Image (cartoon, grey):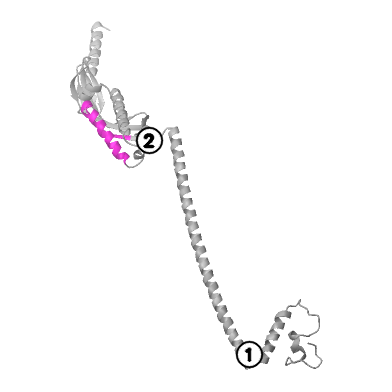
């Protein structure tokens, strides 16, 4: 191989290296800054093939898509001194790569600073609200307040569009969770005791009303019974009087027979002795009159 051919090959290699280092490609998802000795000389955002000075200029790529920052969970107190474990996420888009490069130089640096801003802002807002509000629908309003504060702090300074800041997860430390569960259990126990006391009080009232109504009903029934018994006895006495006035001897006979039935009617009742005396006066004479020789 002659020296001329070697020189030609070397020249072509150099030209190839120079040509390769002089071109770069911009994809649709990228936006590019051309740097010369660390200073920005041009910004390219149009997709396609572009050129630069070889070895002198270099390229800094920035993603134009929506990026996510998933920050590490941090412990934050609320206004009622309740410790919470907060896991936040932020979404942003780089809209001005020149300003972004001048303020942060790289995405990793910006995300570290953005994480600090989100954490400090969330901590400051949480310190003004009680835990009870964070567990209700009002949390959305609190998150909008945090997002607005972070947006004010980063958009104009870093050339980004902050799309959203959200609490991905909100937990309590284990010791706080246990205390809250104990307090909830105590509250439920107090509520159960109050409900049970109200039930017993209502039961006592109903029982007292029922006892009073029962006594009133029994008293009315007894009074009515006595009235009916009195009316019955009066009616019976009237019937007795009429019967006696109609036939006194038969009435006495009927009374005597009823007395005998009531006195000697049981199967285990026995009378042993003479049939003498007024109780047995009708045994010897149908008219109840004493016969000759009968004992008094």
What are the residue bounds of the magenta stretch?
A: 138-166
Q: Is residue 75 left or right of residue 242?
A: left
- Magenta-colored segment: predominant secondary structure: helix
Query: Would you say residue 123 is visible in this rendering?
Result: yes
Q: Is residue 159 magenta?
A: yes
Query: Would you say residue 96 is visible in this rendering?
Result: no
Do the residues bearing badges 2 and 1 touch, measured as CB atoms within 8 Å? Answer: no
Taking 250 as reference, is 134 above or below it? above
Near-viewer residue (261 or 23): 261
Quadrant of the image containing the C terminus: bottom right
Q: Quadrant of residue 61?
A: top left
Q: Residue furthest front?
A: 296
The Cα atoms of the two marked residues, 2 and 1, are separated by 104 Å
Q: Where in the figure is residue 142, as x and y percent of width and height? A: 30, 37
Q: Is residue 262 magenta?
A: no
SS for tag 2?
strand
Q: Residue furthest left?
A: 41
Q: Where in the figure is residue 27, as x and y percent of width and height? A: 24, 28
Question: What residue is disc 1 on?
Answer: 244
Q: Residues within 10 Å of mark 1 (few under 14, many from 20)?
A: some
SS for tag 1?
helix
**Image point (29%, 32%), residue name:** 91
Taking 220 as reference, is 35 above or below it? above
């Amino acid at each position: 191989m002659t020296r001329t051919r070697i020189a030609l090959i070397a020249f072509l290699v150099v030209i190839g290296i120079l040509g390769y280092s002089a071109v770069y490609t911009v994809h649709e998802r990228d936006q590019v800054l051309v740097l010369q000795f660390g200073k920005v000389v041009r910004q390219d955002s149009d997709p396609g093939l572009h050129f630069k000075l070889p070895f002198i200029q270099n390229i800094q790529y920035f993603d134009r898509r929506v990026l996510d920052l998933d920050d590490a969970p941090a412990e934050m107190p609320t206004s009622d001194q309740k410790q919470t474990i907060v896991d936040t996420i932020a979404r942003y888009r780089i809209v001005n790569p020149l300003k972004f490069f001048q303020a942060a130089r790289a995405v990793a640096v910006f995300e570290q600073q953005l994480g600090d801003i989100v954490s400090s802002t969330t901590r400051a807002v949480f310190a003004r609200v009680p835990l009870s509000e964070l567990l209700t629908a009002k949390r959305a309003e609190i998150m909008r307040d945090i997002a607005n504060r972070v947006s004010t702090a980063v958009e104009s300074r870093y050339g980004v569009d902050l799309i959203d800041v959200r609490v991905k997860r909100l937990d309590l430390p284990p010791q706080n969770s246990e205390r809250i569960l104990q307090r909830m259990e105590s509250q439920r126990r107090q509520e159960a005791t109050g409900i049970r006391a109200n039930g017993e009080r209502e039961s006592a009232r109903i029982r007292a009303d029922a006892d009073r109504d029962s006594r009133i009903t029994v008293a009315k029934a007894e009074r009515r019974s006595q009235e009916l018994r009195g009316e019955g006895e009066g009616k019976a006495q009237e019937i007795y009087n009429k019967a006696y006035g109609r036939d006194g001897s038969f009435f006495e006979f009927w009374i005597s027979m009823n007395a005998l039935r009531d006195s000697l009617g049981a199967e285990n009742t026995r009378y042993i002795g003479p049939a003498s005396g007024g109780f047995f006066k009708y045994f010897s004479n149908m008219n109840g009159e004493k016969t000759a020789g009968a004992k008094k």
